[in-house]
Image: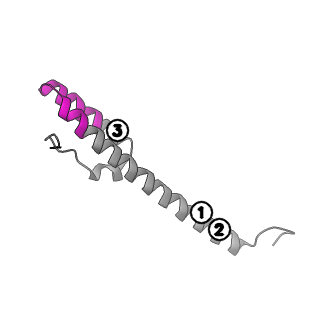
Amino acid sequence: MKNGGLSSERQAEVKDRLVARKQNLWLEVKQQLKTSIGDGYQEMLATARDEEDQASVSLLAETQLSLLGPNGRSWRPSKQPCKG
């Protein structure tokens, strides 16, 4: 250990905790984005006037989900507007 520095073991512990925290934060952000995309998709789909508009809405939702990476693809938009 260097003067005033952390031991290798302590550095590894801190790194592991930071990596775990980062992963948890990213999971939380992705979940919030998926929820937001889903809500926005349902809202836009409900106002789509024809099949072309619906296809544009679906493409937008798929594009946004693709930005979340492979784990973000578990959410699939329904093709039915929400009843509300």
For residue 1: magenta? no
Report the amino acid beneath label 2: Val
Residue 62, horizontal then vertical, whole percent: 28, 39
Position of 49 with respect to 11 (left or right) is left
Position of 47 with respect to 34 (left or right) is left
Q: Residue at x 85, y 68 (%)?
A: 4
Position of 44 with respect to 1 (left or right) is left
Tag 1–tag 2 contact (CB < 8 Å) = yes
Instruction: Determine which residue is flagged by label 2.
Output: 14
For residue 46: magenta? yes
Residue 81, horizontal then vertical, whole percent: 16, 40
Q: Residue at x 17, y 45 (%)?
A: 78
Q: Nearer the viewer, residue 62 or 6?
A: 62
Report the amino acid beneath label 3: Gln
Instruction: Determine which residue is flagged by label 1.
Output: 18
Cα distance in 3D space between marks 1 and 3: 27 Å
Residue 11, horizontal then vertical, whole percent: 69, 68
Report the amino acid beneath label 1: Leu
Q: Secondary structure at mark 1?
A: helix
Q: Is residue 4 above or below residue 61?
A: below
Q: Residue at x 13, y 41 (%)?
A: 80
Residue range highlighted in magenta: 42-61
In the current view of this chain or complex, which residue is farthest to the front?
84
Quadrant location of the C terminus?
top left
Instruction: Determine which residue is flagged by label 3.
Output: 64
Quadrant location of the N terminus?
bottom right
Q: Is residue 21 above or below residue 8?
A: above
Cα distance in 3D space between marks 1 and 2: 6 Å
In the figure, residue 9 lies in which quadrant? bottom right
